[in-house]
Amino acid sequence: MNRATRIPRGLSAGLLLLAVAALPTTVAAQSDLDSSQATAFLGNWDVAIESEFGPFSMDLVIQDQGGKVAASIGSPDMGPGMQEITTITREDEVLRLKWSADAQGQMIEITIDLFPTADGLAVALDGADGMFVASGTATRASS
């Protein structure tokens, strides 16, 4: 009999936060998306997320790397280092960032959707296929 293991909501959210905290230092991964399709998103961003476990912040770097978009994300609140974003796509006005993070030996897929706003970006975060959902904003980081 094949039974799927379902992680309790609180545990999955904790694992997601742990995964973000354990982000290793890496260089940004380059995508197949042309930088010309993501000019509004390029730059250094301060991301503020509101979750059911309280607020947390992340640093997001989206850059041109040889004409293609590259990105990395990390959190000064949860430890040093940046995690490379492995998949970067754009559909209409949404830039989607996806990567997998190791949370105590369990790989968790994390997706962040970015939507342009008058003040920066709206952020929708999804961890472990809907087990942890949060939202927030991103503002351009000061130089």
Image (spheres, rainbow, N blue to C red):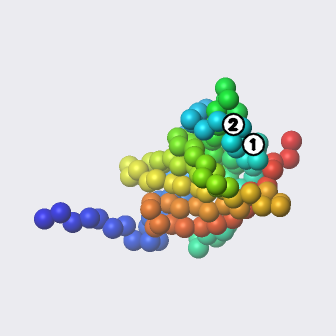
Query: In this view of the protein, which residue sits in the foreground, 72 or 57?
Result: 72
Q: Position of residue 18 (x, y in %)?
A: 52, 55
Q: Is residue 25 visible?
A: no
User: Most extreme residue toward the front, as rendered?
Assistant: 92
Q: Residues within 10 Å of mark 2 (few under 14, many from 20)?
A: many
Q: Quadrant where the N terminus lies?
A: bottom left
Q: Secondary structure at mark 1?
A: helix
Q: Which residue is mark 1?
A: 39
Query: In this view of the protein, which residue sits in the foreground, 88 or 53?
Result: 88
Q: Residue at x 58, y 61 (%)?
A: 125
Residue flagged by tag 1: what amino acid is it?
Thr
Q: Which residue is mark 2?
A: 35
* Relative to 122, residue 143 above or below: above
Q: Is residue 69 visible?
A: yes
Residue flagged by tag 2: what amino acid is it?
Ser
40 left or right, relative to 52: right
Q: Position of residue 63 (x, y in %)?
A: 70, 37
Q: Residue at x 38, y 52 (%)?
A: 106
